[in-house]
Amino acid sequence: MIGDVVNISVKQFTRTKKKVLDENGEKVEIDAIVSDSPRNVLLAMKSDNKLNDFLRHNEFTGEHEIVADVKLDAISMRKGQLPSAFESYLSVYLENHFKVVFKTRALQDGIEAFFAEKTYNPVQEYMEHAYDSWDHKERLNQVFQTWLGAEDSIYVQKIAEMFFVGAVSKVFNPWVKFDYTLDLVGGQGAGKTTFLQKIAVDWYTDSAKDFMDKDNYEIMLKSLIVNDDEMVASRKTTFDELKAFVTKTDLTFRRSYGRRAEKFPKNFVIARTSNKVEYLGDKTGERRFLPVLVDAAKQFVKPFDMTDNDVLQLWGEAVAIYKKGFTLTFDEDFEDELAVYKERFTYRDEAENQIYDYLDMLVPEEWDSMSVVQQHQYTWAYFNNGVYRNDAGFIYEGVKPQESVSSKQILKNVFDIDVAKGDKLARKIKLIMDNNQDWEYRQKRVNGKMTRGYFRKNIQ
């Protein structure tokens, strides 16, 4: 037996008079429970002590669950996700014990009404427990240094705080906008994946292999931390698609066995791992990715040895920071500093290296008055470790940084290409310069003439 009928009086059911055949085959009128009433299904489920106690709706995953092993007559159901055949099991059980065959729509609506009243959020409960258990010792500012051997810098400290508090924010307000991913790079064998599994407790996945495939959405929505291990999903996604996905606040799709497409809050944060250090390639939107360089040789403790209490204390501190009020964006000044920090993680091809070398090149005092040919010849000599002499034999020496450059100059001086023939390279130069923190595009008077181009920021 699944359990005794308790709490709900039989009189509370919506009833009707119904004619049935008795044992002698004669028609008799009986008092029967209405079979097309969702309310009756709801009352029947609430009246049973085991159904009422062990069936819950998980608000975090959006799924109906069994919170302990339970038996419906001869049918055993194990703790976990509600089986797809639950509706059939329940229909037979209710017929056995309430002598009524509920109509399908009434059964479905009654079940949904029951679970709507029986919600819980295990991740919120865990976070509140972590908050109550926190010993008030600060650990977040050293979490990556301790467990992953990261450098001890303000950048790593702030990235840790942003990621952990961002995750807590998603727990208490799943619709909140959080625009960052944590990228753990380098440090092969340091336990990057193990670290993420440990801190995610029971709400981790690395099974989502494509951010655009809606079949993966259900997997992700059951997790607090979605790990794109070795950036497999990122590689299958265009950079624009990846940026858009990171900043989404909701996901719209039809769940398995769902009747229609629904909008769900994106209730998780994204982490990515890679053994490759120079992994950032695009010059736009890189602010969304927060890299931390991992070094197994500098670990104080390996993630494998992380205890449940170690994890609990980290989340307790993060919840405390969240409850005090926390902004889920870095300020503009720190974003600029972070951009410089990220340069070590940015991949540069040969052409890009040449452009950066050109920007670092010291030029003669006479640079602005030199002809196009002379500037190109000087640059050529610089890149080939030579010296540049004019026709009179005068040696031009580099004594000052360039104050301004243009795409046209870079095309000619570095690549010996005229602007009319270098459209593709010109676009690359523009992209690099537009995203270079040390230069800005503006108009300025040079040698009595108004000139548009890129000007070094720290030179007036």
Image (cartoon, helix red, strand yellow):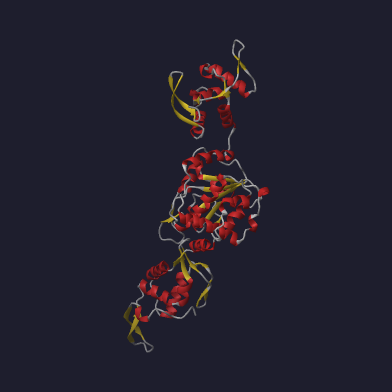
Asked whether residue 182 is in view, the answer is no
Q: Residue at x 58, y 35 (%)?
A: 348
- Residue situated in front as seen by the camera: 2 or 181: 181
Q: Residue at x 60, y 19 (%)?
A: 397
Whether residue 76 sits left or right of residue 191 in the image: it is left
Q: Is residue 309 above or below residue 355?
A: below
Asked whether residue 205 is in view, the answer is yes
Q: Is residue 70 above or below residue 24?
A: above
Tell me residue 10's x, y (percent). Answer: 37, 81
Tell me residue 267's x, y (percent). Answer: 47, 55
Q: Residue furthest top?
A: 392
Whether residue 306 sits left or right of residue 66 in the image: it is right
Q: Residue furthest right?
A: 297
Tell me residue 155's x, y (percent). Answer: 55, 44
Q: Residue furthest bottom?
A: 24
Q: Is residue 350 above or below residue 290?
A: above
Q: Is residue 46 above or below residue 427?
A: below
Whether residue 299 sits left or right of residue 72 in the image: it is right
Tell me residue 246's x, y (percent). Answer: 48, 48
Q: How many marks?
A: 0
